[in-house]
Image: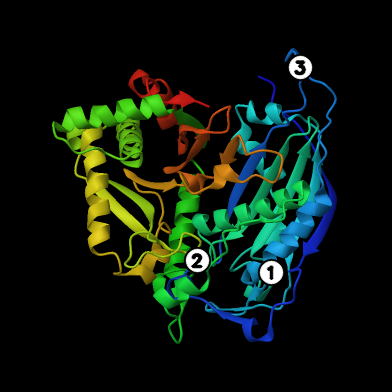
C-alpha cells in the first residue's frame, strides 16, 4: 500500500494572551505540593472533527467544502479562556511557582493538502501525526531550555482539504493532568460555541485552582531530583535503554472494544471467577489486554506459561472523587496517583482483572500516602512483563464541541518511539451519532509481539483493529 504523503502549510502563528490582565495579587502562583514534584514534560491531545457538509444529499459523493470556520472567534474565546486559566498563560520560574505576567500561548493555524479520512484510514496514521502537531521547537521542555521559556500550552488548528479539522495541542504535565486539560478544552469550546451561536446565558464549568492547593498545600522548598528525575544515574539508565532499543522495532496499533464486546468481557470475568463481583469496564478491558500482550511476549521469547515469571502493570488513578471530601471535577492540577498491580505467572483474564481490582482497593486504602512520589512513575526503562496503561475514558474529551460538532476521534499520541514499548493508552470510542461506543486502545509493542497478537483469534473476537 502506497504511503500517504501530505504537506502542512503554516498559515499564521500568533501568541494568544488573556483578554483581561491578571491582577497584581495573582501574579505569583504557587503550585500544590504534588505539582511541585511533577516534571516539565508535555503530552499531546489530538481532536478530530470531520466535515459533515462535504457530502451531497444522496450521500453518493463529495461536494465542494462549504464549512465556514471563524478563526477570529476561536482566538477571541481562547483569549477569554486564558483569563480564567491565567497560570497557563504564564511561565514557570521554579519547580514550585509560576510567574503570571500574561505571556500567552502559541496558536498556529495550518492548511493540510489531503483529506482527513485519508489520514485516519492510513495504516501508518500513528506515524504521521507529528506533522499536524505543534513544532517541537515550540514546546521543548525541561533540560532543553530554561524553565522560564517553557510554554505551558501550545495549540495548532489544522484544516484539511475536505474541510475536516484537527485541533492538536501539547499540554504541560507540570500543571495539568488529562482531566484538567479536558476542563480547559471544554471551557474554550463552550465559549467559542456560544459566540458563534449568540448564546447569552452561558453556563461554564469554572476551573478551580484553589481546591487543589488547599487540599495539598505547597511545601517550603522542593527538588525534583529527589524523585530521581534528571540525576546522573537516571540519565545513565535512559541512555542504556536507548542504546538497547536501537535494535528493537516498536509498532503502534489501535483496537476498538465496543459496548457489546465489553459486556461479554465482563461476563467472561464473572464466569471465570465464579463469583458475583462485577468488574468495571476498565478492569475487564485492561485485564484482557494485559493477559494477551503478556502471553504474546512469552510466546515471542519462547517462555512457557509456568516459567513466565511475574508481570507488572502500572496505571494512574484520578483521586478527585476518592479523597474526603471529594474535590470538584474542575480542580486543576495533577490529581492522580500511580497504581501497581502484579501477577506471579501468566493467568487467564480473570486473574489479571482481579489483580487490577485488588490494586485499586489497596490504593484507596492508602490514598494520601506518597502522593509526592508520583513523578517517579514511569521513568524507568523496559522490563520484560512490565506494562504502563493510561486511560482517558470518561474525562470529557469526546464532548469538546467548538460549534462544528463533537470529535469523532480522540488520539492521545503524537509519535511512535522505542521508549513507548509496552505502553497502552485508552480513550472513549465515539460512534457515528456522537455517542460513546466502548473503548479504543492504542498499543505499543515490539514488532514480533504485535504480530503474534494480531494473529490471535481469541484476542480479535473482542478487539477490532482500527
Disc 3 residue crowd, few under 14, some 14–19, many 20+, Cα 10 Å: few
Residue on which disc 1 sits: 83
Q: Comparing marks 3 and 2, which lies closer to the viewer?
A: 3
Query: How far apart are the two marked residues, 3 and 2, measured between alpha carbons?
Result: 46 Å
- Tell which circle, 1 or 3, labels the residue nearer the N-terminal end: 3
The reply to whether residue 299 is visible in this rendering is no
Mark 2 falls on what kind of element?
Answer: loop
- Residue furthest out toward the front: 201
Query: How far apart are the two marked residues, 2 and 1, measured between alpha carbons?
Result: 17 Å
Dividing the picture into quarters, in which one does residue 84 lie?
bottom right
Mark 1 falls on what kind of element?
Answer: helix
Q: Which mark is residue 333?
A: 2
Disc 1 residue crowd, few under 14, some 14–19, many 20+, Cα 10 Å: some
Mark 2 vs 1: CB contact within 8 A:
no
Dividing the picture into quarters, in which one does residue 336 lie?
bottom left
Query: How far apart are the two marked residues, 1 and 3, measured between alpha carbons?
Result: 42 Å
| Position of 69 relative to 259 (above/below) | below
Mark 3 vs 2: CB contact within 8 A:
no
Residue located at (69% from left, 46% from top): 402
Residue on which disc 3 sits: 57
Amino acid at each position: 500500500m502506497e504511503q500517504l504523503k501530505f504537506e502542512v502549510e503554516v498559515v499564521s502563528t500568533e501568541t494568544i494572551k488573556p483578554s483581561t490582565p491578571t491582577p497584581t495579587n495573582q501574579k505569583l502562583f504557587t503550585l500544590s505540593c504534588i505539582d511541585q514534584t511533577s516534571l516539565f514534560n508535555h503530552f499531546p491531545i489530538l481532536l478530530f472533527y470531520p466535515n459533515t457538509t462535504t457530502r451531497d444529499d444522496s450521500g453518493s459523493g463529495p461536494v465542494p467544502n462549504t464549512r465556514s470556520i471563524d478563526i477570529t472567534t476561536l482566538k477571541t474565546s481562547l483569549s477569554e479562556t486564558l483569563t480564567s486559566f491565567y497560570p497557563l498563560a504564564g511561565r514557570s520560574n521554579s519547580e514550585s511557582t509560576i510567574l503570571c505576567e500574561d505571556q500567552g500561548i502559541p496558536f498556529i493555524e495550518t492548511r493540510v493538502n489531503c483529506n482527513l479520512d485519508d489520514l485516519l484510514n492510513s495504516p501508518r496514521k500513528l506515524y504521521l501525526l507529528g506533522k499536524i502537531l505543534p513544532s517541537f521547537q515550540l514546546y521543548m521542555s525541561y533540560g532543553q531550555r530554561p524553565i522560564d521559556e517553557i510554554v505551558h500550552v501550545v495549540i495548532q488548528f489544522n484544516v484539511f482539504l475536505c474541510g475536516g479539522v484537527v485541533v492538536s495541542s501539547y499540554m504541560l504535565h507540570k500543571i495539568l493532568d488529562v482531566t484538567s486539560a479536558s476542563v480547559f478544552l471544554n471551557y474554550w469550546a463552550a465559549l467559542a460555541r456560544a459566540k458563534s451561536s449568540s448564546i447569552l446565558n452561558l453556563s461554564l464549568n469554572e476551573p478551580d485552582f484553589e481546591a487543589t492547593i488547599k487540599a495539598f498545600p505547597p511545601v517550603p522548598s522542593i527538588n525534583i531530583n529527589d524523585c530521581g528525575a534528571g540525576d546522573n544515574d537516571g540519565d545513565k539508565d535512559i541512555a542504556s535503554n536507548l542504546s538497547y532499543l536501537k535494535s528493537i522495532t516498536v509498532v503502534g496499533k489501535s483496537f476498538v472494544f465496543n459496548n457489546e464486546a465489553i459486556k461479554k468481557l465482563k461476563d467472561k470475568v464473572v464466569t471465570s471467577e465464579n463469583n458475583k463481583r462485577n468488574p468495571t469496564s476498565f478492569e475487564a478491558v485492561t485485564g484482557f489486554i494485559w493477559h494477551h500482550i503478556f502471553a504474546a511476549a512469552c510466546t515471542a521469547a519462547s517462555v512457557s506459561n509456568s516459567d513466565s515469571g511475574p508481570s507488572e502493570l502500572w496505571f494512574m488513578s484520578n483521586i478527585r472523587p476518592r479523597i474526603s471530601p471529594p474535590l470538584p471535577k474542575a480542580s486543576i492540577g495533577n490529581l492522580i496517583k500511580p497504581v501497581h498491580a502484579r501477577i506471579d505467572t501468566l493467568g487467564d483474564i480473570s486473574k489479571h482483572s482481579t489483580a487490577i481490582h485488588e490494586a485499586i482497593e489497596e490504593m484507596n486504602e492508602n490514598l494520601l500516602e506518597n502522593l509526592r512520589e508520583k513523578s517517579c512513575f514511569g521513568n524507568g526503562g523496559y522490563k520484560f512483563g512490565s506494562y504502563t496503561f493510561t486511560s482517558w475514558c470518561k474525562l470529557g474529551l469526546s464532548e469538546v464541541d467548538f460549534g462544528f460538532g463533537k470529535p469523532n476521534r480522540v488520539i492521545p499520541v503524537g509519535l511512535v518511539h522505542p521508549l513507548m514499548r509496552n505502553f497502552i493508552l485508552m480513550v472513549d470510542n465515539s460512534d457515528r451519532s456522537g455517542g460513546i461506543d466502548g473503548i479504543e486502545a492504542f498499543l505499543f509493542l515490539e514488532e514480533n509481539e504485535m504480530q503474534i497478537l494480531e494473529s490471535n483469534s481469541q484476542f480479535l473476537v473482542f478487539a477490532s483493529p482500527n
